[in-house]
Image (cartoon, grey):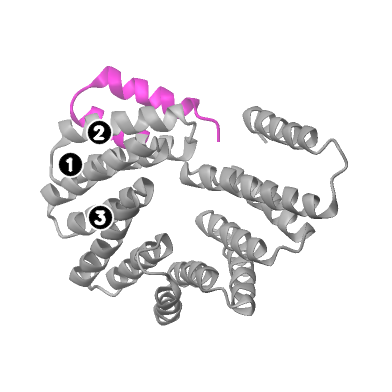
Amino acid sequence: MNRKLLLLLTAIISIFILSCSSAPKKSDEVNTRKNRASDYAEFGNQYFRQGLYNQSLIFFNMALEENIAVDYEPGISKTSSSLGRAYLIKGDIANAEKYMKDGYNLAKQLGDKDLIALSANNLAELNISKNLIPESEKFISEAISNAKPNSLIQAESYHTLAIIERKKGEQEKALATIKKAIEINKQNKTHSSLAANYYFSASIYSQDNNYSKAAEMLNLAIKEDRLEENSYGLAKDYKALGMVALKNSKQEEAYLFFIKSFNIFKAIKNTDEEKSVLKYLIEISSNLGKVSDAEYYKAQLGAIKE
């Protein structure tokens, strides 16, 4: 655990200890634990959005423990689903499946439509990662049918459906579906989700060699990520712009985008992405005859600890 995270955890725990110094009634203790779980879950969500998945797992686990301690089943279902998503992003399929199924089964027992929509969407994502498209379609249909109209989970489910449609080679359908997610996220002003919608749209246009439209979508993503102050999202957006420019044989333009991406990834200490972008920078600077730049980026790559 890094020092910054350790200090944050210590501060949070100290605040909770001070706020609970007088012996509370049992009902107050239940509410305190539920509130604490909610706070931990929000920290987990913040780290998840920043691409810091190890840190998000720590807080989601803490939230789950608090919810289990007071047998708060809606919280148990929701945080189990959150843990599953974090494990899925990290490539730990076994743990992802365990926690997602725990969240889904409990949501079904509770008959909570919002939680069913949330957990079914997560299971759709899991099955996409396993290339089980019919299974993912079953779960995403369940998610959409249970989601409230114009809700955040409905928008997220449309995004997942668009991924499925793209996997099936149905590009036009995927673009039409992602537009539904965009409209909902615009209404709700959910900037990070809207940025993800634009990023996905850009990937389709880029695949179809429509580079101007791809760049347009990525610039919209940058606008939304700036509003959210989402450093990880911004770095990914600039990296994608670099790749689009590179595909369009605009090396000088790509080079500038990759520099922006590298600087942000370096600032947030995402070393995996740093290394990925540095490889582009080394290749392009060499191609452009920027010898000193190429040597600099090679040294930067060598300085990153495995």
> Which quadrant is home to the C terminus?
top right
Q: Amino acid at mark 2?
A: Phe
Q: Magenta stretch: residue 303 in it?
A: yes
Whether residue 282 is visible to the viewer of this picture, yes or no, is no
- The reply to whether dot 1 and dot 2 touch (C-beta < 8 Å) is yes
Q: Secondary structure at mark 2?
A: helix
Residue under pointer 3: 203
| Label 1 CA crowd tier, 10 Å (few <14, some 14–19, many 20+) | many
The answer to whether residue 218 is magenta is no
Question: Which residue is painted at 74% across and 48% down in the image?
Answer: 32
Determine whether, in the image, residue 210 is placed left or right of residue 2. left
Highlighted magenta segment, given as a residue range? 278-306
Between 237 and 285, the one nearer to me in the picture: 237
Q: Which residue is mark 1?
A: 245
Locate residue 91, reporting x and y percent.
53, 58
User: Residue 257, labelled with which disc?
Assistant: 2
Q: Which x, y percent locates residue 104? A: 58, 73
* Left or right position of 4 against 199: right
Q: Amino acid at mark 3?
A: Ser
Instruction: List x then y, in percent, for residue 61.
Output: 68, 52
C-alpha distance separating marks 1 and 2: 9 Å
Depth check, front residue: 260 or 301: 260
| Image quarter of the N terminus | top right
- The answer to which quarter of the image holds residue 226 is top left
Rendered residue at 29%/75% (across/down): 168
Question: Which one is earlier in the sequence, the residue at label 1 or at label 3?
Answer: 3
Name the residue at 19% across, 24% down. Answer: 289
Q: Main secondary structure of the magenta part?
A: helix
Q: In the rendered image of this protein, does residue 183 appear above or below residue 41? A: below
Q: Amino acid at mark 1?
A: Ala
Residue 187 lies, with reference to residue 221, above or below; the image says: below
